[in-house]
Image (spheres, rainbow, N blue to C red):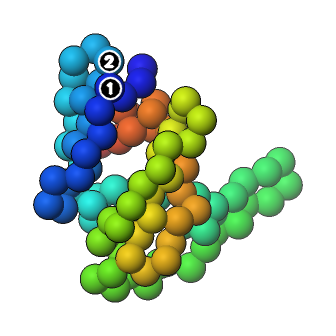
Amino acid sequence: MKPRDIQTINNVLAIVWEDGGESYFEFERLRRACPCATCQGERNILLEARPAPPNYTPASFQLTAWRPVGGYAIQPQWADGHNTGLYSFEYLRDLEKPA
């Protein structure tokens, strides 16, 4: 599933999907769900590296830009300089589901 349109509206990332579905992510929720290794840690067969909890500031929740990555993800740029998270379209669809 790919997005047909992605826009920022105030503090929300809005996505219209190819199937006509829509997703809305508040910036804070999106940032706290960053899937990068710095935020979520890394795992391999022998080791699991857990990072220290992020030290969020108000700038952490200000989305300044985003860019498409291939045909499978977006990469947000946050006002605090963080930009290593790749949010696959599949991850975003899963993220909108209730926990």
Q: Which residue is mark 2?
A: 18
Q: Which residue is mark 1?
A: 4
- Horizontal side of 48 relative to 37 (left or right) equals right
* Image quadrant in which the N terminus is located: top left
Q: Tell me the residue at 23%/52% (across/down).
A: 8
- Horizontal side of 19 relative to 76 (left or right) equals left
Q: Please provide percent x and percent y for residue 73.
A: 51, 39
Residue 4 position (above or below residue 61):
above
Number of numbered callouts drawn:
2
Q: Is residue 62 visible?
A: yes
Kind of residue at disc 1: Arg
User: Tag 1, which secondary structure?
Assistant: strand
Q: Please provide percent x and percent y for residue 29.
A: 29, 58
Q: Tell me the residue at 59%/35% (across/down).
A: 70
Residue 1 position (above or below residue 48):
above
User: Tag 2, which secondary structure?
Assistant: loop
Circle nearer the N terminus (2, 1): 1
Q: Quadrant of residue 33?
A: bottom left
Residue closer to the observer: 23 or 66: 66
Kind of residue at disc 2: Glu
Q: Please provide percent x and percent y for residue 14.
A: 22, 43
Q: CA distance from mark 2 to mark 1?
A: 5 Å
**Which residue is most to the right?**
46
Residue 53 position (above or below residue 48):
below
Q: Are marks 2 and 1 in contact (CB under 8 Å)?
A: yes
Q: Please provide percent x and percent y for residue 40.
A: 56, 61
